[in-house]
Amino acid sequence: MAEAVGGAFLSAFLDVVFDKLVTDEVVDFIRGKKLDLNLLENLKTTLRLVGAVLDDAEKKQIKLSSVNQWLIELKDVLYEADDLLDEISTKSATQKKVIKVFSRFTDRKMASKLEKVVGKLDKVLEGMKGLPLQVMAGESNESWNAQPTTSLEDGYGMYGRDTDKEAIMRLLLEDSSDGVQVSVTAIVGMGGVGKTTLARSVFNDSNLKQMFDLNAWVCVSDQFDIVKVTQTMIEQLTHESCKLNDLNLLQLELMDKLKNKKFLIILDDVWIQDYESWSNLTKPFLHGIRGSKILLTTRNENVVNVVPYHIVQVLPLSKLSNEDCWLVFANHAFPSSGSGEEDRRALEKIGREIVKKCNGLPLAARSLGGMLRRKHAIRDWNNILESDIWELPESQCKIIPALRISYHYLPPHLKRCFVYCSLYPKDYEFQKDDLILLWMAEDLLKLPNKGKSLEVGYEYFDDLVSRSFFQHSRSNLTWDNCFVMHDLVHDLALSLGGEFYFRSEDLRKETKIGIKTRHLSVTKFSDPISKIEVFDKLQFLRTFMAIYFKDSPFNKEKEPGIVVLKLKCLRVLSFCGFASLDVLPDSIGKLIHLRYLNLSFTSIKTLPESLCNLYNLQTLVLSHCEMLTRLPTGMQNLINLCHLHINGTRIEEMPRGMGMLSHLQHLDFFIVGKDKENGIKELGTLSNLHGSLFVRKLENVTRSNEALEARMLDKKHINHLSLQWSNGNDSQTELDVLCKLKPHQGLESLTIWGYNGTIFPDWVGNFWFYKNEDCPSVTPFSSLETLEIDNMFCWELWSTPESDAFPLLKSLTIEDCPKLRGDLPNHLPALETLTITNCELLVSSLPRAPTLKRLEICKSNNVSLHVFPLLLESIEVEGSPMVESMIEAITSIEPTCLQHLKLRDYSSAISFPGGHLPASLKALHISNLKNLEFPTEHKPELLEPLPIYNSCDSLTSLPLVTFPNLKTLRIENCENMESLLGSGSESFKSLNSFRITRCPNIESFPREGLPAPNLTDFVVKYCNKLKSLPDEMNTLLPKLEYLQVEHCPEIESFPHGGMPPNLRTVWIVNCEKLLSGLAWPSMGMLTDLSFEGPCDGIKSFPKEGLLPPSLVSLGLYHFSNLESLTCKGLLHLTSLQKFEIVDCQKLENMEGERLPDSLIKLSIRRCPLLEKQCHRKHPQIWPKISHIRGINVDGRWI
């Protein structure tokens, strides 16, 4: 089928349907039901005829709505056909177990469905006849690129690329050190990010041009024509027209021009991905002299991988900052003369919001700025702001075709994979493996066999990364495999998903979902599913995913059952984050198409046995189901299960027969049982396991030969192996078992827990361990990179190994070895990280480690430092004498690489001599150094976070001006601190987080206020003498979003002049005077407000008009004497949706008419008197709350 289909989105789907159509199960069904085999042939013929025009249809659908509608109808029928064929295949495969299964099913109905599908496809074929579609034998020669690029600059300048330009200039001007004549520099980035603009600026730089004999600019474009490109290069070099058309003559001519010349050739917009084309194009380049350069731009990193040169430097081009993007926009949007100053200010405010939509893409900023260049009406600018970029005309907004062309050149299988990502919310961070499992469940991976699914998925994913559809997440530093889509790329996916893919923030409010919708992701449904009419339209839904799921304010016990009953075609079902879900209905077993089930982060306690009827299930995710203690007994029936995620559960033993799951590739852990059916032998047949494996309760292996049956040596794809004995003291048996658990040689990490053997087997690398004997405890691996030794309470001796030991060791951790004495290795040439904790008897000097970057020594006071490693970036030390010796070393050495310094627990007087901190220091953490003289004379320019805990008793005031780039300030338990000092009008532009706690003598903030324009959270706690918050918060803290005030009894009111305009969340704890005030200043954006007691003097709350009307969520906690709620003080809160009351023991009454009508959730906990009234539906209480949809009293919905 692949030969008949081009590169269109639907061609990959057509392949899937066609492949299923010719399977033995489907053919046998047709024959077994004595149906006309011509039905099958007709279906194949129709698919072939339709497939032949898909390439042409995909291009023409953009401009011809009739073609677009035809493709929609075709896709709808293909989904229906695929569901039917999958049902036939599933029932045919399972009838081997259930005799005559088809006779018990409605055979006539199945046959009727098949005939109906064939009829629908015939109608689609008939509808094709009136459309201007052509059969295409391959890719069209028509280029999607609007126009070629040129080397001429446009006079508008370039913004935000100075650093990138300098890097490229440096690469182009440096001489190749290895004698290579030509080297290549590649600028790689997504469409519209500014690659051509940057290359053009480099090409036109006068300093660069004079360094080369010849310069040429060639736009290669998406339709590569080697003859045309070679002609262009000759014309660029000679400035004359080239009439040659023969490639051989052209290359000879180009070779002659380049011979013995130093040249610079720019190849812009390169799409060439095959090695032969590159080799043929660049043969003439080999005749230039050393120092010749090629600079290419491409949106596909795979292009770089096939460049036939030894030296290829890659410069990934990232997005512009919002400010630089604004400069691009403003340069095009505002002519030198035009609107007045006042009008421009108004437009600029709207324009800056428009620029945020561009998300760092200069082409988008340029296009939108150009569209608005001659428009001065605020209405026109607001129209652009409120429009989706994908709704704008392509002729004016060039970013649309720039991104669409990247999609056009995706292979069909990648198009489907990319569009599937439209189910993710914008800016959603997704992990590589998670997405691949979803693709697999939706049949988006073309698999050679079941065991290769991950490898194929990785290949697809990496391809999309190389083409800039996915980008590594910069905000998530925890996961290497965390990715995001650029906002405009996400918008492209949404536009391509059409009516088949739907992303909903609130399902109750959706009206656009139709019967063609097959894939749905939701954040919440604020009505019970049984009342959401849209569910009646979703009987063909394949994907139901909860993403960022928010608990809804009603009893959801029946919701999963309704989903399962209504959505019979589901292949992907995710209740991830559905916290109140504790039971899965038995009807789950009827979802015969289901391949992916995710119940992670739910309250599931048990799984129904019917789950094991899911013949097609490939992935079962139960991660962090903390209430789950066992798996269903029939797990062995899930013979197609490939991925079982059970980390974070409390499963106590494995079900019997797990060895039957021979396709299993991921299993977080295996608990060795005492019975033969769930013993270690079950691991033996799981030869396809990949990644990490944790084998627990090895004490249940009582005979060493049983361990051999696990066949650990055969598990070639396991990278990380952990082995654990939970208890036991038979050291010889444990040694024998460990000997038989030898893994393959490619293992990357090994962890052994609870091992009681007195010696390690040879395969561990001759790790010997003796108690109380003068024998070497450790003989190291020669290739070992990471060594962690934890909780070895009886380990006493580590004799010094040979000086050439551990040549590759990068990380050494020794923790909780209280009896360890002796010396550490004296030389570790590759060591980068050293951690020693809770080794009080260890008397040793630190090893010589010239590459050491991170050092942590805590509760190991006999370890000494003789030579300070000059490359140290991070130091954490605790106690005497380490703190003292470290400060002395830092003072004398003056390290230039040190960025992070953490000092703890030192009681003697100490200071940094000269009052100086290292100039390179970016983070300083001080804890329990009460007699430290804090350095305030010198300005540490790079310091960003500064936490000071229970330290610096001599510090009475802290001049904030000392820290010009401080981002985070934490001050806690500084008893003598009285004030913070400002510096007049100077603002603290970098500060974004401020917290001061338990400073009993601090009375005020700087008189001029706290000018911190980027501060987002402000917390002050347990400051008994503090009388007020900083003045002018409304103007000096414009970005403040979070305010917390705790146990500050002297604060009576908020500052005059109003509160910060972006304040969203306020938490006030035991500030009775503040709560007793008559009225608060305006807080127009405040949505979340919480109060916490005890506030003994408050019996009734709140006063009328006290609370801001913008509130969405309100909480009252731990009020000791609160007796009554005042409804009048709440009735004006017309946006209030959630109200929580916790631990108000005396609260019994509600005064006034009723709580606000907008409330959808009322939660009452540990308020015994009020709870009693609610349960009884007392006439003085119930009429005031009965209109609320969700009322939860002490954990139960009423």
Image: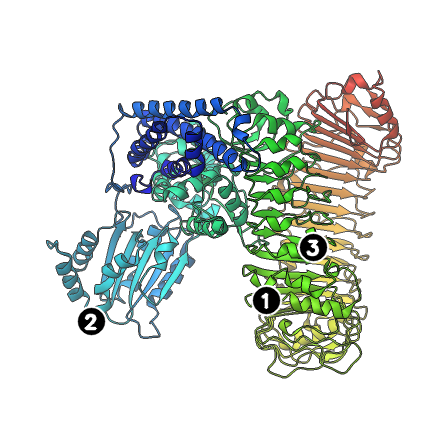
Colour scheme of the picture = rainbow
Tell me where residue 367 appears, x and y as whole percent. Answer: 36, 39
What's the residue type where badge 1 is placed?
Ser
Q: Quadrant of residue 14?
A: top left
Q: How many marks?
A: 3
Q: Residue at x 68, y 67 (%)?
A: 738
Q: Is residue 878 left or right of residue 24?
A: right
Residue closest to the eye, 547 or 412? 412
On residue 260, the disc is 2
Q: Spot the residue most to the left.
A: 243
Alpha-carbon distance for marks 2 and 1?
48 Å
Q: Residue at x 46, y 26 (%)?
A: 516
Tell me where residue 774 appears, x and y as whole percent. Answer: 76, 83
Residue closest to the eye, 972 or 628? 628
Q: Are marks 2 and 1 in contact (CB under 8 Å)?
A: no
What's the residue type where badge 3 is placed?
Gly
Q: Is residue 143 left or right of residue 1005?
A: left
Q: Is residue 739 left or right of residue 880?
A: left
Alpha-carbon distance for marks 3 and 1?
56 Å
Q: Relative to residue 219, is residue 581 depicted above or below?
A: above
Lower sequence index among marks 3 and 1: 3
Q: Which residue is denoted by mark 1 in the rendering?
A: 920
Residue closest to the eye, 739 or 506? 739
Label 1 SS:
loop
Locate the N terminus by quadrant.
top left
Q: Is residue 1085 left or right of residue 365?
A: right
Q: Nearer the viewer, mark 3 or mark 1?
A: 3
Q: Which residue is denoted by mark 3 in the rendering?
A: 679
Q: Relative to residue 32, is residue 408 depicted above or below?
A: below
